[in-house]
Image: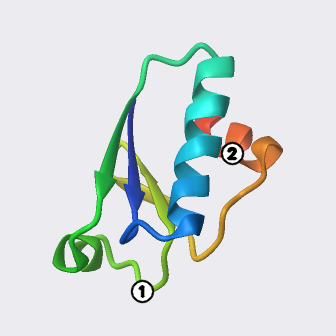
Amino acid sequence: MKLQILGTGCPKCKKMTEVAEKVASEMGLDYEIEKVTDVADIMEFGVMSTPALAVDGKVVVAGKVPNEEKMKALLSS
């Protein structure tokens, strides 16, 4: 599973990374995290507000950091 954190490195982007890593580890997922920080690359995903999370190339949340429970739901679908 490829988790892409879309954002320029703001505190919310860092929090998104922390929550995604924690939940993916707890769930025992085989995952890799990629940080997408280039604005042009972020725009290619169609994301207008960061932070955002893409799972295997598909944006699942944008503009907010989900709590652990919501993140678990996003990573299991």
Q: Bin the neighbour count of mark 2 within 10 Å (Cα to Cα): few under 14, some 14-19, many 20 and up.
A: many
Task: Say which of 51 and 12 sits in front.
Answer: 12
Q: Quadrant of residue 20?
A: top right
Screen quadrant of the C terminus: top right
Task: Say which of 10 and 30 sits in front.
Answer: 10
Task: Say which of 32 and 73 sits in front.
Answer: 32
Q: Disc 2 marks which residue?
A: 71
The first of marks 2 and 1 along the sequence is 1
Residue 65 % position (x, y): 66, 63
Q: Residue at x 48, y 76 (%)?
A: 50
> Which element carries disc 1, helix, strand or loop?
loop
- State left or right for residue 5 relative to residue 14: left
What amino acid is at disc 2? Met
Q: Quadrant of residue 69?
A: top right
Screen quadrant of the N terminus: top left
- State left or right for residue 35 relative to residue 53: left
Q: Residue at x 36, y 71 (%)?
A: 8
The vertical placement of 48 against 28, above or below, is below
Q: Which mark is residue 48?
A: 1
Q: Residue at x 28, y 72 (%)?
A: 42
Q: CA separation, marks 2 and 1?
A: 20 Å
Colour mapping:
rainbow
Q: Residue furthest top?
A: 28
> Which element carries disc 2, helix, strand or loop?
helix
Give the mark count: 2
What amino acid is at disc 1? Met
Q: Residue furthest bottom?
A: 48
Q: Residue at x 58, y 54 (%)?
A: 16
Residue 62 % position (x, y): 54, 71
Q: Bin the neighbour count of mark 1 within 10 Å (Cα to Cα): few under 14, some 14-19, many 20 and up.
A: few
